[in-house]
Image (spheres, grey):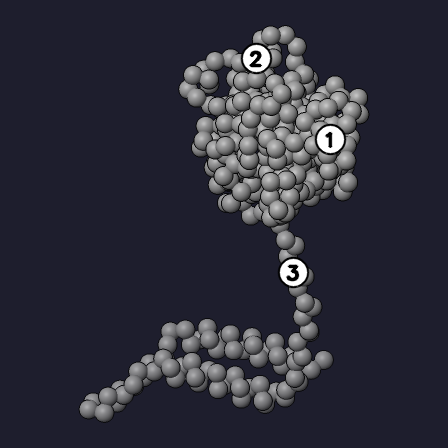
Amino acid sequence: MSYCLNSHCPQPENADDVKFCLSCGSKLLLKERYRAIKPIGQGGFGKTFLAVDEDKPSKPPCVIKQFYPQAQGTNSVQKAVELFTLEAVQLDDLGQHPQIPALLAYFTQDDRQYLVQEFIDGQNLAEELAQNGAFSESQIWQLLKDLLPVLQFCHSRGVIHRDIKPENILRGHAKLVLVDFGASKSATATALNQTGTSIGTPEYVAPEQMRGRAIFASDIYSLGATCIRLLTARSPFDSYDINNDSWIWQQFLKTPLSPGLNRILEKMLVSIPMRRYQTADEVLKDLNQSPGVATPAPIPKPQSTPTFVSKSSSQIELELEEVKTQILGAAKPQPNPAQSPKPISQPANKTAMDKDLEELKAKYNPPNQ
């Protein structure tokens, strides 16, 4: 099937072998190669379509993102244009990372801006949550280990994502993939010192980002909020006590977290930016130093009751005498053949040793009752 990208088309669905929409006459191929198949999403700045690249023999799938701002007013539209353009520029650089979709093309056609991205075949984490229920602690450990290096990479390129949430994390073939850089921001020194527009999904947005002052630590906060959403299956809004200005998400866990992960998430979610983790590398360091999910200690095997062999009184006396002889004999100095033998003095603790041996004798050879 071919899907017409004209937003005013009354009947956008067409056969897959036509080049022009049978309903409105619009061209169905972008740049003579990308054919939209069906819409798969819509955000604040554009519509997203599943597509195929007909320029390649295998016709691999790809994603077409059409700039279609929902904002009204000249200033808002201009801001949306800048963000859409910025997304293309940043994807061109960030797409070299295996956990960020590659940018395949960026162009304007019929007075619309488009970007074409690599297609990631997999569910997003919001869909997984709805299908399978709350995530386990081990899944959250793996999520952090998968995504923190991606954040580290983005931040090293001066890019703040600003919209980290379960819907923007896809499960790829090997690791999790971070998508939708439409709200991302270039963290230049000038930009960080200016108050801008508040962008992002409110449930996951850090307090400073809500005021238009996003920093690298804002992404860390959003990732932490994403984790508690997945752990509790509740909105982060419902896991925060406004009256006491404190997180209460632990109350909604089916199973308490290990102290290590609990401490890491708490620090990721600190409201005051300077008390939060400042870099993804700091979180990774704590994550790697924490013991992780505790594995239950092995159940000890029941030990068999020792079997005592009954011995006669004479046997016990004989064995104790042998022990005594060995101990005292080891303490004797070796005679020097060149000298005449001297009387050997007994060790000072001989009396105490005799007493110990008597106690052993009494223990293993109790008097007859």
- The amino acid marked with disc number 3 is Pro
Q: x and y percent of residue 157 in the render?
A: 45, 31
Quadrant of residue 114 within the rendered picture: top right
Which of label 3 and label 1 is nearer to you? Answer: 1
Q: What amino acid does circle 2 point to?
A: Gln
Q: Residue at x 54, y 22 (%)?
A: 85
Tell me if I can see residue 194 in this picture: yes
Mark 2 or 1, nearer chain start: 1
Q: From mark 3 to mark 1, how far is it between C-alphas? A: 59 Å
* Foreground of the two, 178 or 108: 108
Instruction: Work out whether mark 2 precedes mark 3 in sequence or the reverse, and give the earlier one.
Output: 2
Q: Which badge, 3 or 1, comes first in the chain's sequence?
A: 1
User: Measured along the vertical axis of the image, is residue 190 above or below residue 127?
Assistant: above
Residue found farthest to the left: 338
Q: Which is nearer the eye, 355 or 196?
A: 196
- Disc 3 target residue: 298
- The Cα–Cα distance between marks 2 and 1, rounded to whole angstroms, is 28 Å
Q: In this orientation, does residue 367 appear? A: no
Residue visible at 74% across and 27% down in the picture: 21
Residue assigned mark 2: 78
User: Where on the picture, by quarter, is residue 234?
Assistant: top right
Residue at the outermost right position: 11
In front: mark 2 or mark 3?
A: 2
Q: Amino acid at mark 1?
A: Tyr
